[in-house]
Image (cartoon, helix red, strand yellow):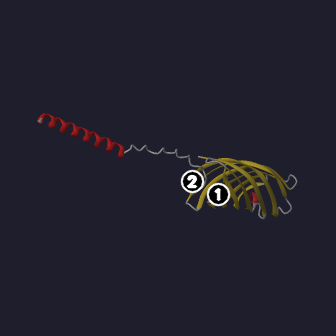
């Protein structure tokens, strides 16, 4: 009789334990983690102008004589290359650039010819994201068949980042030369308008 009671107690205990384990399993379902969507690649929006660049320009030059060269005028196309470096401070950008334009501008009906112009530029602009409007000034060296001279220039320009490495833009410059070829009073003014393309590196 006692053996039957012990056996019954053992069976009841086993059944209770199994029931508790089953109940515990049912109360704690396995939660699958939610799938994580891939992070899209960031879209390039511009606004970073720090770095070096090099490129080429094509444009138009108009030369007007003054003083001893009064009435000696001419205009024609010009083309060249440029190399520079910009530094982006956040809202403002500054830079330095060296550029060279090859020209073949006859002035005074063949009295002289402007052969080339080399410029050393300082630039300061406002960072508008992909757009960079800027002012520039510096010194220009002009070579002509009537003589050479170094004079100041100033102007404005704008650049646009087509891609992270490629920019296009335009630039308008005003040059002042005096005593051209060491001839007293032989002055000339020149205006250039160019379209520019640059590769940033």
Q: Return the residue nearer the eye: 183 or 177.
A: 177
Q: Quadrant of the N terminus?
A: top left
Provide the secondary structure element on which disc 2 rests: loop
- 104 sits to left or right of 120: right
- 8 sits to left or right of 62: left
| In the image, farthest residue toward the left | 2
Mark 2 to mark 1: distance in Å? 17 Å
Residue linked to disc 2 = 50
Q: Return the residue nearer the eye: 145 or 125.
A: 125
Provide the secondary structure element on which disc 1 rests: strand
Residue linked to disc 1 = 121
Kindly identify the residue that appears in the image at 18 percent across and 39 percent down. Answer: 9
Q: Position of residue 130 (x, y in %)?
A: 64, 55
Q: Position of residue 79 (x, y in %)?
A: 75, 48
Q: Position of residue 65 (x, y in %)?
A: 82, 61
The quarter holding residue 138 reads bottom right
Q: Return the residue nearer the eye: 9 or 181.
A: 9
- 68 sits to left or right of 166: right
Kindly identify the residue that appears in the image at 70 percent across and 58 percent down. Answer: 157
Decide: few, some or many residues near mark 2? Use Cα within 10 Å; few <14, some 14-19, many ≥20.
some
Q: How many marks do you count on the picture?
A: 2
Q: Is residue 136 visible?
A: no
Q: Is residue 185 above or below residue 10?
A: below
């Amino acid at each position: 009789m006692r053996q039957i009671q012990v056996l019954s107690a053992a069976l009841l205990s086993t059944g209770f334990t199994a029931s508790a384990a089953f109940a515990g399993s049912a109360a704690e379902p396995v939660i699958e983690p939610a799938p994580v969507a891939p992070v899209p690649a960031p879209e390039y929006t511009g606004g970073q102008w720090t770095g070096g660049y090099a490129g080429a320009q094509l444009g138009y030059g108009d030369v007007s004589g003054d003083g001893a060269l009064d009435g000696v005028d001419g205009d024609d196309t010009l083309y060249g290359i440029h190399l520079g470096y910009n530094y982006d401070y956040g809202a403002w950008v500054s830079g330095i650039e060296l550029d060279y334009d090859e020209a073949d501008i006859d002035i005074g009906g063949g009295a002289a010819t402007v052969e080339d112009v080399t410029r050393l530029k300082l630039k300061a602009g406002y960072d508008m994201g992909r757009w960079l409007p800027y002012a520039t000034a510096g010194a220009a060296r002009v070579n002509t068949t009537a003589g050479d001279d170094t004079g100041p220039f100033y102007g404005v320009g704008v650049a646009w980042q087509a891609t992270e490495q490629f920019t296009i833009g335009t630039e308008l410059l005003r040059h002042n030369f005096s005593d051209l070829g060491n001839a007293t009073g032989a002055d000339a003014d020149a205006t250039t308008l160019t379209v520019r393309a640059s590769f940033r590196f």
